[in-house]
Amino acid sequence: MNGILIIIRKEWRTFAGSDRGMFLLYAILIVSWSFMLANPSTGPVETGPLWLVFFSVVISANFSNTVFISERLNGNLEILLTSGIARKHILFGKMIFIAGISTLIGLVCIAFSSFLRSAVFHTTGSSTGPAEVLLYCCAVFMNTAGSAWLSVFMSNPRLLHLANLFTLALLITAYMVISAYLPLPPETLSAVLVLLGIGATIFAVRLYESEKILQPVNL
């Protein structure tokens, strides 16, 4: 447990010490997506809760690029793996950090969209409910777990976004097709995302316990 906390603190210090331009980028993302969620003409009334699922890819995959792939390319991950901290704790610490910071950004976006909905668009009620928030959190978990697993096989950080987007696109397409014939609540999609996340976590743990994680990456 102490090893997990060490990794979380290390990732937080790295994030807090990042270039100011990155924080500006996240602020722009939060404001722009908040407006889309708050605007009655483009909000969840028309796009559905799936809008938040794709937003989770933008946020969580971006953190995963730095925490998993970039550290693997520059050798920092190998140093961590040989530092005496259990490999499983390194993996879980990184996953908890990514999932936590991604969830926090998503909740800020949702809260800000509710403020804009009443202050700017003068619309009563929230644009998202508990089911949509749960769906976003489940999508973050799946993206984080999937990134932890796929990062071992990838040398290009950009491919991580594409892989997560492709996986979610297939899942959402299947969900929409089935929903056309058999109405499914958002909780169904949330459950599927959690199951996929658990499966990806199991595969990631096995990779981190093997020597494959230390193999050089061909650039």
Image: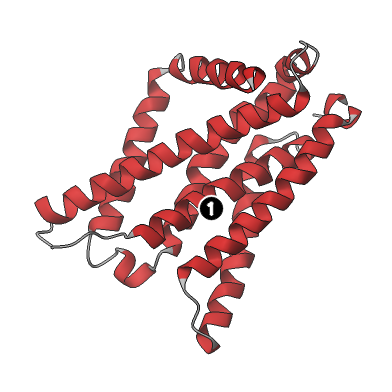
Observer able to see residue 76:
yes
Image point 39% across, 23% down: which residue? 21
Q: Which residue lies furthest to the bottom in this view?
A: 181
Q: Is residue 33 above or below residue 17?
A: below
**Element under disc 1:** helix
Considering depth in this image, is 147 or 126 the residue closer to the camera?
Answer: 126
Which quadrant would residue 22 be assigned to in this image? Answer: top left
Q: Which of 202 and 145 is in front in this view?
A: 202
Residue 126 image position (x, y, % from top left): 23, 59
Residue flagged by tag 1: what amino acid is it?
Ala
Would you name the residue on which mark 1 appears? 139
Q: Residue at x 40, y 60 (%)?
A: 132
Nearer to me, 116 or 83:
83
Left or right for 80, reference 103? right
Could you say where residue 178 lies in the image, as x and y percent from the top left?
58, 81
Q: Where's the N terminus, which quadrant?
A: top right
Q: In this view, does 20 lie above or below 125?
A: above
Q: In which quarter of the image is residue 155?
A: top right
Q: Residue at x 30, y 56 (%)?
A: 36
Left or right: 22 with respect to 124?
right
